[in-house]
Amino acid sequence: MADAIKYLLDESRLPREWYNIVADLPRPPEPVLHPGTLQAIGPADLEPLFPMALIAQEVATERMIEIPEPVREVYRQWRPSPLYRARRLERALDTPAKIYYKYEGVSPAGSHKPNTAVAQAFYNKEAGVRRLTTETGAGQWGSALAFAGALFGLEVRVYMVRVSFEQKPYRNALMEAWGAQCVASPSEETNAGRQILAAHPNSPGSLGIAISEAVEVAAQHADTKYALGSVLNHVLLHQTVIGEEAIAQLEMAGDYPDIIVGCTGGGSNFAGIAFPFIGAGLRGGPKPRVIACEPSACPSLTRGRYAYDFGDTGHLTPLVKMHTLGSTFVPPGFHAGGLRYHGMAPLVSLLQELGLIESRAYTQSSCFEAGIEFARSEGVLPAPEANHAVRGAIEEALRCKSEGVSRTILFNLCGHGHFDMQAYIDFQAGKLEDRAYDEGELNAAFDSLPKVAAE
């Protein structure tokens, strides 16, 4: 506990600006394309879905963007979040490595997601929006937007991936407690949902399908906008408060990471912890190794193609260049529901193409093993998504042990697992299966990628 207190920042150190990595990249991201014309889109093309303030952040090139005071006021409820030195885990692993973790489970929703949910709710309220629609996988993003919607007086409708909806009823209850409506996706409410159910009546759903449903509803109602919990530039931007705080906290500890680890589904929590450090390295500072850890059942970085693709299954969204498994790819049902997305954030994808990050894929059983080991050492039970980062950090710590080298490892523990107990029950009972994706379905999804001549 002494270490926890030592690395807690006073709220006066709460960042006043978000960090935009685009300003420091050696080359700009690829343009976003209109799904019909395949030409670069402008702000007007995005206005049916997002308020102009968020569109401006999506295309921003300046390094630092001011955090509005009403957003910082809400952040102060749990930010700055604590940085811990995992000394008991170090002893359990008998490693010379120093392991730190930034703990985002202290937010009201129990994860990093409110960092952008609060910002998006604020900007939508300022623009006169009445209702937000969104998707959610494990339920962390849906919970966060429900929380933010309640604070700013916005109605929220959440389309939750069906397999997670059925696995995690308490997440649904939490969203409803904050006043949101939660719908299992695919649903009969939208054309996109009905088309999927007609072809696959027992579809477990996917984030791509849920996005299609949420986008469809937003596009059809003038008083409604769409909110996304990951992938897009402005979402990753809002999460950089994590890494900015971590830099200041490690300075208090007199340390700096040699290795940074984060779990990746769409890329937001990974970007949040890693981008400020990567940016510092691009500006001449130290350059840590940065490792993105993803599920082997949905391996967009390690198995996907770097190509233009739709962000959703129903092909309602613009085309972005990213590492993708194909928008029609539906991963098998596994418990890290927040990592079941077919694509990776364009900025994270570009960093891998530039050789600035590396990626690894892990089975869910190996990740739950790591989560249990972490809980028995440090006392915090991670979310299934966060277990991928724990697995990566443990692997690096054991490498330090085998090489007889001390390195400093930092990872983002992006949320707690208190709403994921059925997954842990299944794991402890030996019922958790490592389900592989269908290679034929993946190849079919690759074959259906849009043909974009600019590539």
Image (tube, rainbow, N blue to C red):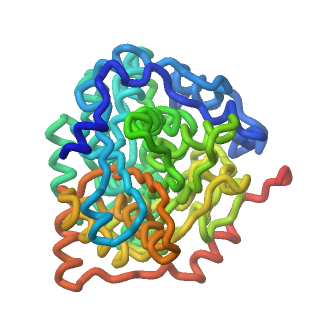
Q: Is residue 327 visible?
A: yes
Q: Using the image, determine if residue 202 lies above or below residue 214.
A: below
The residue depicted at 30 percent of the width and 22 percent of the height is 11
* Horizontal relation, residue 348 to residue 336: left or right: right
The residue depicted at 72 percent of the width and 41 percent of the height is 29
The residue depicted at 35 percent of the width and 29 percent of the height is 118
Q: Residue furthest right?
A: 453
In this orientation, which residue lies closer to the viewer: 61 or 199?
61
Q: Quadrant of residue 253?
A: top left
In this orientation, which residue lies closer to the viewer: 414 or 7?
7
Give the x, y percent position of residue 45: 64, 30
Give the x, y percent position of residue 438: 52, 81
Q: Is residue 133 visible?
A: no
Q: Using the image, determine if residue 334 lies above or below residue 23.
A: below
Give the x, y percent position of residue 229: 43, 43
* Horizontal relation, residue 402 to residue 6: left or right: right
* Horizontal relation, residue 84 to residue 296: left or right: left
Q: Quadrant of residue 224?
A: top left
The residue depicted at 21 percent of the width and 57 percent of the height is 380
